[in-house]
Image: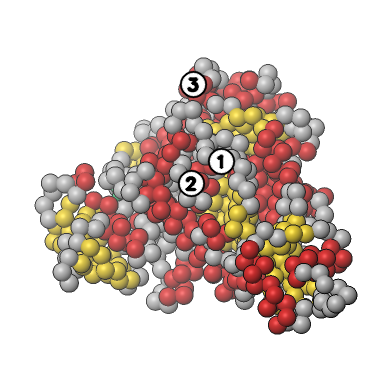
């Protein structure tokens, strides 16, 4: 086949033809099998390991100089060039979706990309939805217009606008030339009976589509939270504001790097921006397709997509060069994105469908956080509250209806299970809660979906660290007490580790462990978040006890134990009744904006009123951070209710 070679991936049995010299990682991506590649293909993280079953690969990059490898053999997909036809086995742990395809059925395999999640209860978000009347941003109105005659010679377009105003009491216009071009024949072909789709903007209402006949009973929209690691989406029926389904999938941009900085760097490579954009647009379109198939929804009846995401994710979705986000003075191209056509961002819904992006505040506090504040209602209350959103980074907002201050703490993705030896998103099979028997060290655990465990998600790690500390298997520095007699404590390939689940009880082919390196990651992550909050409080001359409500949000899973979060020093040691676990506030906020048009303006106002505080510019932040690199904290007096902290 000349300079082209056929690569067959197992167990999917997907085949792609690629140029000789393509990396196996790129070939897998072309086959729509995104692999875990935390380092963005630099050959450092070792997560993209695959098994070449037949054929020849050549080492490149960091592995350059190594001999050509004839199969069979394990290689790093990012460091192996395709030199002949290949058969490649992808182990479950190398797959970005984290699971092997289910059976041979192609449809089932597609579904395997998604995991259903139960949205964690978000009482404040529901309160907001009840407190503000349902008034979707996009509405569909059926009109029966009088045909023109010599006494009523209004133009076609004015006739539609008049009909709409008479029926709804709202003035409307259109800026779409396509609507006007098609209008004459359309009105006459359907006996002047049409459905108009109207976008209710912040200033005026605009017709976005005119269709023949009555299609007013089918107003659908999508909401998405575009996270650095995961994308959550919902299909919404707008007339009654019902959520018809929720899905979560991995952000395939992770193939190009696990954090926003690596991706911004990747965006500067030839085709980099295009690839990053396509990765997120494809993921949204696949989710949209799957939702429509499952619920029998016609794409033409989908009028809007409301998204919330961090500033880099929104730039990449809109194919805007994000380079200045990481260059001093860290200014994004845009914080507030006007309403645009969804098709212009590569999102495939009805041809005139619109895309609404929640406004950001700065390069590192984006629309996911303003949407989160909206969902919690911090900006509406006189009481001082805090929102701590723990995703791939940790963003914190402190304030009330009069003032708000925000910061971004470089926590890293440990609480999302990323970069951890046995880490997993909050998906089925993730260990989400556990306890350790202080005498026998036996571990009792619960997994999402009660499936056999495949790994550990954020809430599982938080419980685990607490249990290890309370049973004195771990010291306050995060080191295992090696002298402790326990069959679960052992020296592994990467140093000391604790076996959480034996392989015989797991759905993977190895023991599920937590290593000292994992604990170190978690310690740094919790220290970044705690010290970020402590710095904001100090800046405002306040303490944690001045805060009435602490909203915790993020992709921990639905089982976050607040007590465990306090015990490990992630959250401040205050009365537990002040904590509210909110789940995905970014998604809830995006939905609120879709269903309550007045909240579009409200989000813009709250974003404009929020101050961004740059932690790295604060001389005391580093001291706070260093002091928090201890369980629960170097100053035990800050955690009076944590018993192990008081012991020597
Ligand atoms: S080692 Fe291949 S992506 Fe990191």
The answer to the question of whether label 1 and label 2 lie on touching residues, with beta carbons closer than 8 A, is yes
Is residue 506 rendered to the left or right of residue 403?
left
Say above or below: 488 vs 509: above
The answer for how far apart the CA atoms under marks 3 and 1 are is 30 Å
Does the image show residue 348?
A: yes
Residue 342, given in percent of the width and then of the height, sits at: 57, 59
Where does label 1 land, which residue? 334
Is residue 123 rendered to the left or right of residue 590?
right
The answer for how far apart the CA atoms under marks 2 and 3 are is 33 Å
Say above or below: 63 vs 519: below
Where does label 2 land, which residue? 320
The answer to the question of whether label 2 and label 3 lie on touching residues, with beta carbons closer than 8 A, is no
Earlier residue among tags 3 and 1? 1
Does the image show residue 160?
A: no
Is disc 3 surrounded by few (<14), some (14 to 19) or many (20+) residues within 10 Å? some
Q: Residue at x 23, y 63 (%)?
A: 19
Q: Residue furthest front?
A: 150
Between 493 and 625, the one nearer to me in the picture: 625
Is residue 374 rendered to the left or right of residue 491?
right
Q: Residue at x 60, y 54 (%)?
A: 340
Earlier residue among tags 1 and 2? 2
Q: Which mark is residue 622?
A: 3
Residue 120, given in percent of the width and then of the height, sits at: 65, 53
User: Is the C-beta of the residue carrying label 3 under 8 Å from the nearest atom of ligand 1?
Assistant: no
Q: Nearer the viewer, mark 3 or mark 1?
A: 1
Image quadrant assignment for residue 361: top right
Between 479 and 429, the one nearer to me in the picture: 429
């Amino acid at each position: 086949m000349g300079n082209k070679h056929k690569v067959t991936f197992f167990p999917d049995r997907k085949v792609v033809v690629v140029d000789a010299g393509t990396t196996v990682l790129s070939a897998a991506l072309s086959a729509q099998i995104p692999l875990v590649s935390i380092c963005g293909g630099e050959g450092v993280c070792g997560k993209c390991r695959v098994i070449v079953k037949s054929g020849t690969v050549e080492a490149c990059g960091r592995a350059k100089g190594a001999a050509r490898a004839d199969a069979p053999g394990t290689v790093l997909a990012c460091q192996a060039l395709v030199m002949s036809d290949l058969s490649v086995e992808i182990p479950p742990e190398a797959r970005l979706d984290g699971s092997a395809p289910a059976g041979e059925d192609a449809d089932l395999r597609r579904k395997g990309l998604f995991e259903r999640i139960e949205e964690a209860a978000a009482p404040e978000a529901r309160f907001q939805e009840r407190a503000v009347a349902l008034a979707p941003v996009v509405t569909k109105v059926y009109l029966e217009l009088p045909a023109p005659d010599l006494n009523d010679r209004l133009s076609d377009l004015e006739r539609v606008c008049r009909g709409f105003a008479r029926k709804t009491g709202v003035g409307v216009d259109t800026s779409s030339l396509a609507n006007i071009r098609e209008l004459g024949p359309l009105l006459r072909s359907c006996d002047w009976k049409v459905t108009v789709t109207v976008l209710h903007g912040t200033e005026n209402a605009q017709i976005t589509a005119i269709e023949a006949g009555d299609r007013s009973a089918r107003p659908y929209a999508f909401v998405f939270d575009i996270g650095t690691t995961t994308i959550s989406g919902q299909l919404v029926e707008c007339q009654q504001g019902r959520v018809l389904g929720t899905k979560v999938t991995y952000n395939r941009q992770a193939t190009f790097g696990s954090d926003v900085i690596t991706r911004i760097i990747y965006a500067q490579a030839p085709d980099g921006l295009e690839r990053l954009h396509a990765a997120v647009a494809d993921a949204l379109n696949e989710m949209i397709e799957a939702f429509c198939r499952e619920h029998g929804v016609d794409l033409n009846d989908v009028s809007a997509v409301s998204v919330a995401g961090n500033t880099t994710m929104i730039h990449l979705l809109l194919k805007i060069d994000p380079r200045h986000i990481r260059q001093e003075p860290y200014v994004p191209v845009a914080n507030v994105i006007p309403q645009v056509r969804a098709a212009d961002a590569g999102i495939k819904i009805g041809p005139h469908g619109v895309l609404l992006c929640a406004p950001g505040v700065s390069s590192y506090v984006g629309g996911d956080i303003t949407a989160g504040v909206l969902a919690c209602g911090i900006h509406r209350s006189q009481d001082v509250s805090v929102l701590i959103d723990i995703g791939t980074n940790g963003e914190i907002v402190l304030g009330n209806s009069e003032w708000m201050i925000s910061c971004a703490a470089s926590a890293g993705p440990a609480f999302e299970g990323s970069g951890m030896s046995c880490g997993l998103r909050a998906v089925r099979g993730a260990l989400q809660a556990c306890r350790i028997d202080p005498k026998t060290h036996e571990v009792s655990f619960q997994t999402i979906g009660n499936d056999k465990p495949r790994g550990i998600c954020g809430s599982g790690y938080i419980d685990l660290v607490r249990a290890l500390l309370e049973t004195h298997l771990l010291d306050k520095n995060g080191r295992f007490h090696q002298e402790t007699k326990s069959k679960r404590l052992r020296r592994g390939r990467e140093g000391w580790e604790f076996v959480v689940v034996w392989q015989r009880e797991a759905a993977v082919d190895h023991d599920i462990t937590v290593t000292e390196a994992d604990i170190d990651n978690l310690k740094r992550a919790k220290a970044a978040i705690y010290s970020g909050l402590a710095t904001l409080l100090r800046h405002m001359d306040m303490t944690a006890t001045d805060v009435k409500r602490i909203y915790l949000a993020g992709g921990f899973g639905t089982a976050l134990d607040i007590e465990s979060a306090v015990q490990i020093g992630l959250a401040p040691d205050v009365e537990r009744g002040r904590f509210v676990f909110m789940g995905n506030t970014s998604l809830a906020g995006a939905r609120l904006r879709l269903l309550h048009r007045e909240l579009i303006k409200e989000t813009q106002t709250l974003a404009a009123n929020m101050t961004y505080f740059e932690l790295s510019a604060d001389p005391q932040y580093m001291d706070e951070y260093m002091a928090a690199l201890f369980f629960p904290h170097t100053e035990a007096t800050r955690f009076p209710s944590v018993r192990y902290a008081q012991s020597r």
